[in-house]
Image (tube, grey):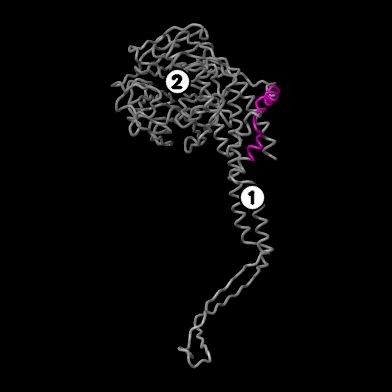
C-alpha cells in the first residue's frame, strides 16, 4: 500500500522537473567565436564576461553583446584552458603558460613558462593563502612568493598529468588534485600529498571517441575527468569520471557513486555546483542537473558536438563552452502552478502504459518472490507435524535348508537334503513428533529465507519502479525535442528502447505485451 500512495506523487515531481527543464532557452552569445574551452562571469562587475578559446582570451563588458580580444597567444594551436578570478586578479591557464592581469584584463603578464611543451600546457590553477598551485600535463608546480618563482612538487605529482585542482572553500589550505593516476589531497604547507581516490587508467586509444592531440608517451588516459568542491557545503566534493559522478562528504576519505539515472552517457566530462543550480554535469553532448534521485537534462535546444566546460553566474545563469560557440541559459525558479498542469499531463503519458502495480506484480511473479510464497511455507511447516514419519524394513533370509520326503523308493535323489526358497521378512512403522505442532525448527529457516526474499523483492521492485518512471520521463523529453535535435532524438529513442528491454527482462516480457496497442 505504501508504494501505491507514493508513486503518483513521484510522477508529479518528475514531470514538474521536466517542465522546468523545457523552459530553458539556450542562446549563442559567442558572436562567432568558436572552439570555446572556458568561460568566466566576473563576480565583481555585472555583465562582464571572459571567454577562452584557441584564438585567445576575449572580454565582454555589455553582457555578451560584443567581444574584444584582450590576450592573444603566440601559437594559434594553443588554447585557454581555465580562467580564474581571485581578489580582483585574473589568471589564465593556457597552452602557452600562465598569464595574470591585475587590471580587469587590460594588460597581461606571463608569470609561468615551462621548460618544454608538456610543462607549458597549463591545465588548472588554485590560489591558496600561502601559495599558488599550477597543474600541467607534466606535473604540479607551486609558487610561494606571489608567482615570482616556481618549483615542481616532488613525489607522484612531480610528473603526473594534472587534470583539475580545487581548494576546500572552508579550509583553503586543503588542496585537491585530480590526476590521471587518482585524486590527491594536501592539507597545509608542511604536509605531503596523499592519494584519496584511485583511478583505473585505460589502454591508450580506448577512449578514442574524442580526438586528442598526440603527446606520444606523455599522454595517458584515465577514468578521472574533473573535481570540484561544493560552495554551500562544508565537506562535499564531486568527481567527474568516465563512469559517472562520485561524491565525498568527509573531505575525500570515502567516495560513493551518485546515481546515473537520467544520464544519457556516464562519461561525465565536467561538473559544476552553485547554490542556485545545485549540482550540474556535462557529458560530451548533454548538460544535466541532479535532482536528488535522478538527473534531468538541461541541454534541450543546445546543439553542440562537444561541451567542454560549464560556469554559473550565481543568479541562475548557466554558461556552456562548446566547440561551436558559447551558450547561455537562465534556469527559472519552480512555477507554483506547474503541478496542476502535471496532473493533466499525467493522464496523457500514463494512458498507454500498464499500471505500475501490475508491472511490479509481474516482476515479483517472474522472479518468484511473491509474499504469498512465505505464507505458503509457514502453512506447510505447520501441517508437517500431522504427517507421520514412515519407516519400512526389509530382510532376506537365506540360511534355511529344507528336506523334502517324497515317499518313493525308486526315484533318484530321493531323501536328499535340498535348499529351499529364500525367506523374506519386512516391517513398517509410523511415528509422530507432536511437539512440532507448537514449534518447528523449520520456522527458523523460513524466517531467514523470508528476510532474504523480502530484500530481494524490494530490490527488484525498486529497480522496476525507477525504470518505469524513467521511461515515462524519456517519452516526455522526446516529445519536447526540436526538429534540429536529430542526434539527441536518436539517443533518447535508444534510451527508451533500453528501458523497455530492461522492464521486459524483469517481468518476463509482460511489460511490452501490456503496453502493446489494443486492437
Q: Position of residue 480 (x, y in %)?
A: 59, 19
Residue pushed farthest left? 115
Left or right, 202 with reference to 358: left
Query: Residue at the location (52% across, 80% down)?
Result: 421
Which of the two discs, 2 and 1, labels the residue nearer the N terminus? Answer: 2
Query: Residue at the location (46% across, 7% down)?
Result: 67
Q: Quadrant of residue 156?
A: top left
Left or right, 347 with reference to 203: right
Q: Badge 2 is on which residue? A: 308
Magenta-colored stretch includes residue 359:
yes
Q: Quadrant of residue 519?
A: top right
- Relative to 159, say whether 484 is above or below: above
Q: Which residues are magenta?
A: 340-361
Query: Which circle, 2 or 1, is nearer the viewer?
Result: 1
Q: Residues within 10 Å of mark 2 (few under 14, many from 20)?
A: many
Task: Give 456 or 136, whichever is nearer the viewer.
Answer: 456
- Relative to 458, say whether 107 is above or below: above
Residue 373 tag number: 1
Which quarter of the figure is the N terminus placed in?
top right
Left or right, 508 with reference to 240: right
Q: Position of residue 116 (x, y in %)?
A: 28, 21
Magenta-colored stretch includes residue 296:
no
Amino acid at each position: 500500500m505504501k508504494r501505491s500512495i507514493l508513486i503518483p506523487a513521484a510522477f508529479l515531481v518528475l514531470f514538474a522537473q521536466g517542465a522546468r527543464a523545457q523552459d530553458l532557452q539556450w542562446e549563442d552569445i559567442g558572436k562567432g567565436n568558436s572552439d570555446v574551452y572556458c568561460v568566466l562571469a566576473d563576480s565583481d562587475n555585472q555583465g562582464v564576461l571572459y571567454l577562452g578559446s584557441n584564438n585567445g582570451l576575449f572580454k565582454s563588458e555589455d553582457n555578451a553583446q560584443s567581444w574584444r580580444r584582450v590576450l592573444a597567444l603566440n601559437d594559434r594551436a594553443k588554447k585557454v584552458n581555465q580562467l580564474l578570478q581571485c581578489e580582483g586578479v585574473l589568471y589564465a591557464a593556457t597552452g602557452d603558460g600562465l598569464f595574470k592581469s591585475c587590471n580587469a584584463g587590460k594588460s597581461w603578464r606571463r608569470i609561468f613558462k615551462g621548460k618544454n611543451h608538456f610543462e607549458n600546457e597549463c591545465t588548472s590553477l588554485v590560489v591558496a593563502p600561502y601559495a599558488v598551485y599550477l597543474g600541467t600535463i607534466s606535473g604540479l608546480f607551486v609558487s610561494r612568493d606571489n608567482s615570482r618563482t616556481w618549483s615542481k612538487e616532488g613525489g607522484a605529482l612531480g610528473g603526473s598529468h594534472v587534470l583539475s585542482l580545487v581548494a576546500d572553500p572552508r579550509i583553503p589550505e586543503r588542496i585537491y588534485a585530480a590526476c590521471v593516476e587518482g585524486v590527491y589531497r594536501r592539507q597545509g604547507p608542511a604536509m605531503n600529498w596523499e592519494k584519496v581516490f584511485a583511478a583505473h587508467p585505460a589502454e591508450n586509444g580506448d577512449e578514442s571517441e574524442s580526438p586528442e592531440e598526440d603527446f606520444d608517451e606523455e599522454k595517458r588516459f584515465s577514468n578521472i575527468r574533473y573535481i570540484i568542491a561544493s560552495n554551500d557545503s562544508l565537506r562535499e566534493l564531486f568527481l567527474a569520471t568516465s563512469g559517472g559522478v562520485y561524491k565525498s562528504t568527509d573531505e575525500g576519505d570515502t567516495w560513493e557513486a551518485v546515481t546515473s539515472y537520467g544520464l544519457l552517457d556516464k562519461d561525465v566530462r565536467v561538473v559544476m555546483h552553485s547554490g542556485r543550480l545545485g549540482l550540474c554535469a556535462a557529458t560530451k553532448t548533454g548538460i544535466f542537473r541532479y535532482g536528488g534521485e535522478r538527473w534531468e537534462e538541461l541541454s534541450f535546444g543546445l546543439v553542440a558536438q562537444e561541451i567542454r566546460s560549464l560556469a554559473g553566474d550565481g543568479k541562475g545563469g548557466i554558461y556552456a563552452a562548446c566547440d561551436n560557440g558559447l551558450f547561455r541559459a537562465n534556469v527559472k525558479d519552480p512555477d507554483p502552478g506547474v503541478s496542476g498542469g502535471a496532473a493533466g499531463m499525467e493522464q496523457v503519458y500514463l494512458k498507454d502504459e500498464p499500471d505500475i502495480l501490475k508491472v511490479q506484480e509481474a516482476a515479483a511473479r517472474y522472479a518468484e518472490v511473491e509474499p504469498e510464497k512465505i505464507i505458503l511455507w509457514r502453512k506447510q511447516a505447520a501441517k508437517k507435524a500431522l504427517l507421520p514419519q514412515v519407516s519400512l524394513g526389509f530382510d532376506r533370509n537365506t540360511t534355511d535348508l529344507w528336506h523334502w520326503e517324497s515317499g518313493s523308493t525308486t526315484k533318484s535323489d530321493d531323501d536328499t537334503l535340498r535348499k529351499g526358497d529364500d525367506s523374506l521378512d519386512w516391517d513398517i512403522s509410523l511415528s509422530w513428533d507432536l511437539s512440532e505442532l507448537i514449534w518447528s525448527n523449520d520456522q527458523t529457516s523460513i524466517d531467514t529465507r523470508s528476510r532474504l526474499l523480502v530484500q530481494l523483492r524490494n530490490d527488484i521492485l525498486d529497480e522496476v519502479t525507477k525504470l518505469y518512471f524513467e521511461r515515462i520521463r524519456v517519452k516526455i523529453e522526446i516529445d519536447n525535442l526540436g526538429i534540429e535535435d536529430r542526434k539527441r532524438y536518436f539517443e533518447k529513442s535508444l534510451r527508451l528502447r533500453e528501458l523497455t528491454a530492461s522492464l521486459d527482462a524483469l517481468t518476463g516480457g509482460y511489460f511490452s505485451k501490456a503496453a502493446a496497442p489494443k486492437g
